[in-house]
Image (cartoon, grey):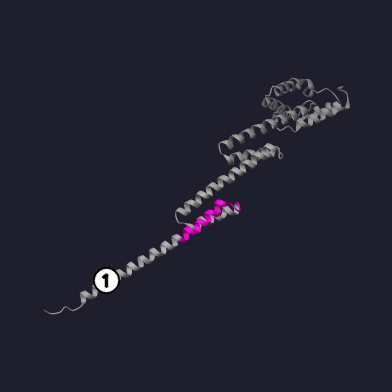
Amino acid sequence: MRRGSFCFGCICCLTAKGKTDAKQPRHRFSTAPELADTFLKAVRNEPIDFFDPARILPRIQRATCAFEQGDHQLAAEILTDLEAAGHIDPALAPLRRQLNQAIRTNTIHELTNRARRLIVEKEYGLALQGVEQLLKLDISSPDALALKEQIQKQLTLQQLAESFASAKTHLDKHAYSRARIVLQNITDLRPGESRALAMLADVEVRERAYLSALHEKQQLHQAARESLEELRVRNSAHQTAPRARP
């Protein structure tokens, strides 16, 4: 495209605006006169050395080469620096799209593999965090959805195992009310859970037997106390009774 064309002047104006709004101070115009002179040249379609596409072509080529070789970090650093400087070039936008897509694909692959490793290590909480990150990148990813379902099943089984262990501990300590609450929570979570229903029935049987044994023990203890008291009264009466004279 000719430098004297209207489109070239528009591109220079837009690029000058980008340089004015650059995030990093080093990329901005150093003085107001420099800014004004640049805009005037752009309006008059005069050449502007800073915006000469030939100046950034080698850097675009280096970014492209890095991208093709799989060095996404270097490619991203070069592109980001060019964009931060306010450069507008037809080759930048397509390369940025390709780079972002490649980085996204790699990130998805890494997060998927990491989640699978964490599942093997039974680190289900960390695995679920990774899957949630995956779904933010691709909400309909079949792999991510399958992993999430697998993790949730494992978390449920883990929670059940911990709840059953807690119920057994309460049961062994004769804390029947607490054991009953834990087991009822299990049945609320999984209605019809056979093991929980069986343990609930066992709780009732063992509680009745325990209370019966406790009641019998209390009765025996009371009977023993009454017998001792009766014996004490008899001995006291015998000691205080007048003795016959010889």
- Does the magenta run of residues contain 203? yes
Q: At 25% across and 73% down in the image, what residue appears? A: 234
Left of 55 or right of it: where is 185?
A: left
Identify which residue, 141 or 103, lies in the foreground: 141
- Is 182 displayed left or right of 1 in the figure? left
Q: Is residue 90 left or right of residue 5?
A: left
Image spot of residue 182 (x, y percent): 53, 54
**Residue occupying the far right of the picture:** 5
Looking at this view, is 245 or 87 the one in front?
A: 245
- Magenta-colored stretch includes residue 87: no
Task: Residue at 30% x, 71% y: name it.
Answer: 229
Quadrant assignment for the C terminus:
bottom left
Identify residue type, mark 1. Arg
Per the rendered image, the range of residues in magenta is 190-208
Q: Residue at x 64, y 42 (%)?
A: 149
Residue under numbered circle 1: 232
Q: In terms of image quadrants, where is residue 212?
A: bottom left
- Give coordinates of residue 176: x percent, y percent: 48, 57
Give the image location of residue 236, x and y in percent.
24, 73
